[in-house]
Amino acid sequence: MSKGRFITVEGIEGAGKSTHLTAIRDLIQSAGHTVLLTREPGGTPLGEGIRQLLLRPDLGPMSPEAELLLLFGARAEHLARVIRPALDAGQWVLCDRFTDATYAYQGGGRGLPAERIVTLERWVHGDLQPDLTLLFDLPIATGLARVAHRGAEDRFEQEERAFFERVQAAYRARAERFPGRFRVIDTDAEPDEVRLRVERALRPWL
């Protein structure tokens, strides 16, 4: 059995990932592939527990180093229990965020040195990288306006605009550094138009 494909979807809050993940899964399935839809942090009981800790605003400030290590702890479990077994079984894995998010949020947003993230990346998942990363990109003001309509904000959503500017800049820098893997999708458009853009990006892989 051939090894499956690993596709990740990235973007700042309000970029539209949640809106389109199911449609992406359905598109891959329509091409005859078995798809596992998962997320980070999360994807396992341990990962979901860590996710709750990371998003809880009532816990107050968390050191960037603790945040980084919690994320990679969840990721190690996710890879061992879910992602690698699915890929080895020939399934396609569609993941809402992965290590690019760590470079964006903890590297760009929190200001942690990239070298620390690189060290953990090599230790936790070695040479395993997504085959394709869809970066949902839109103006920060638009994304934050969308988030404001969701209700109570989590710990990341409560950050200042400058934080998201750094996150977005880090995401775009990653896309420029790895053009063979990244496809940048402008999501500042109507959902039907965004869906068409996503389909165009996916078609060569299907």
Image: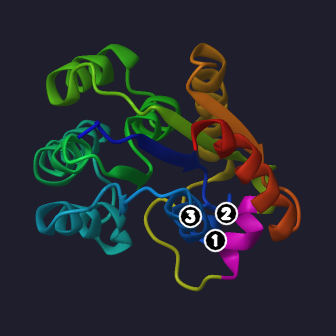
Residue 49, magenta (yes or no): no
- Amino acid type shown at disc 3: Ser
| Labels 2 and 1 touching (C-beta < 8 A) | yes
Q: Residues within 10 Å of mark 3 (few under 14, many from 20)?
A: few
Determine the CA span between mark 1 and mark 3. 18 Å
Chain-order first, disc 3 or disc 2: 2
**Residue for point 63% across, 25% down:** 175
**SS for tag 2?**
loop
* Residue 93 left/right relative to 3: right
The magenta span reads 143-149
Q: Left of 26 or right of it: where is 20? A: right
The disc placed on residue 16 is 2
Residue at 27%, 70% (x, y): give it.
Answer: 52
Give the labeled residue for mark 1: 19
How far is the residue under mark 2 from the one under mark 1?
Answer: 5 Å
Above/below status of 204 relative to 119: below
Residue 154: horizontal and vertical position, in percent?
45, 70
- Residue type at numbered disc 2: Gly
Q: Badge 2: few (under 14), some or many (20 or more) residues near its Cα, within 10 Å?
A: many
Secondary structure under badge 1? helix
- Determine whether the residue tagged by mark 3 lies in a helix, strand or loop: helix
- Left or right: residue 67 versus residue 169 is left
Look at the picture and state if 11 lies above or below 147: above
